[in-house]
């Protein structure tokens, strides 16, 4: 009986997660920077690219025993599902009664919680590569800007901080997505990601 050697390819699911992050932050930043108006047509991108794409990466990273990737993509998938639902509420999809009860301070506490979460994840990404670490620095700034804006603290500055940070996140994530796909596809480094900042892992 002949046996065939089957090559098992361990694909990196983070590429799709990074692409989803790049797309949703590109679209969302256009609103914060005043280039576009309203959130109605951002909602699909938040749900499908921000939510489902990163959820897919989360589930498949868990199969690879990657706790950092699983936690990061899973948490931000839920973040974008929540943000998308928030926009649906504000747009009156669930009725005028619930829309009238909106309190932006509650949103501020949500962003604050994610800001704290992102700080911990930033420490974790010091052991991956420089591109993802820098990406997380701007995620920290985005969440800081969103938190301050929701609490009404320096609203003009904080909204601009969030918008600029979000656009930079998009550009870095596009690069990281491209590097992840092309480097694995060609089996060599076409787009460098940079060495880890620290080597804390055993």
Image (spheres, grey):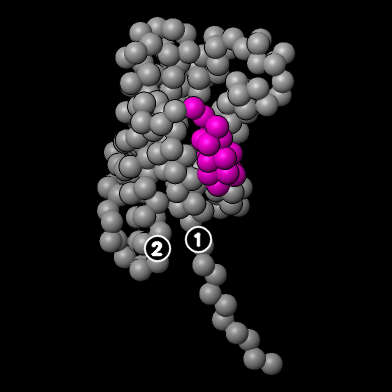
Of residues 178 and 5, the one nearer the viewer is 178
The range drawn in magenta is 38-55
Which residue, given by chain and number where applicable, does mark 2 sit on?
Answer: 184
Q: Are marks 1 and 2 in contact (CB under 8 Å)?
A: yes
For residue 39: magenta?
yes
The residue at 44%/33% (across/down) is 28
Of residues 148 and 10, the one nearer the viewer is 148
Q: Is residue 93 left or right of residue 69?
A: right
- The CA span between labels 1 and 2 is 8 Å
Residue 185 percent coordinates (x, y): 40, 66
The residue at 36%/67% (across/down) is 187
Q: Compared with residue 79, is residue 179 higher up or lower down, i.e. above or below? A: below
Which residue, given by chain and number where applicable, does mark 1 sit on?
Answer: 11
Of residues 157 and 2, the one nearer the viewer is 157
Q: Is residue 180 left or right of residue 103?
A: left
Q: Is residue 60 left or right of residue 169?
A: right
């Amino acid at each position: 009986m002949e046996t065939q050697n089957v090559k098992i390819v361990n694909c990196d699911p983070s590429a799709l997660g990074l692409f989803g992050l790049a797309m949703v932050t590109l679209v969302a930043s256009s609103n914060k920077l005043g280039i576009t108006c309203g959130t109605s047509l951002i909602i699909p991108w938040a749900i499908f690219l921000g939510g489902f794409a990163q959820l897919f990466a989360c589930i498949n990273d868990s199969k690879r025993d990657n706790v950092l990737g699983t936690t990061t993509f899973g948490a931000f998938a839920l973040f974008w599902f929540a943000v998308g639902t928030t926009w649906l509420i504000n747009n009156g999809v669930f009725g005028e009664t619930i829309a009238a009860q909106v309190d932006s301070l509650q949103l501020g506490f949500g962003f604050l919680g994610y800001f704290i979460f992102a700080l911990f994840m930033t420490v974790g990404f010091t052991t991956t590569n420089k591109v993802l670490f820098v990406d997380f620095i701007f995620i920290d700034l985005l969440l800081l800007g969103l938190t301050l804006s929701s609490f009404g603290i320096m609203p003009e500055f904080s909204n601009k901080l969030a918008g600029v940070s979000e656009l930079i996140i998009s550009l870095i994530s596009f690069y990281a997505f491209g590097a992840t796909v092309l480097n694995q596809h060609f089996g060599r480094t076409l787009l460098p990601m940079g060495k880890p900042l620290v080597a804390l892992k055993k």
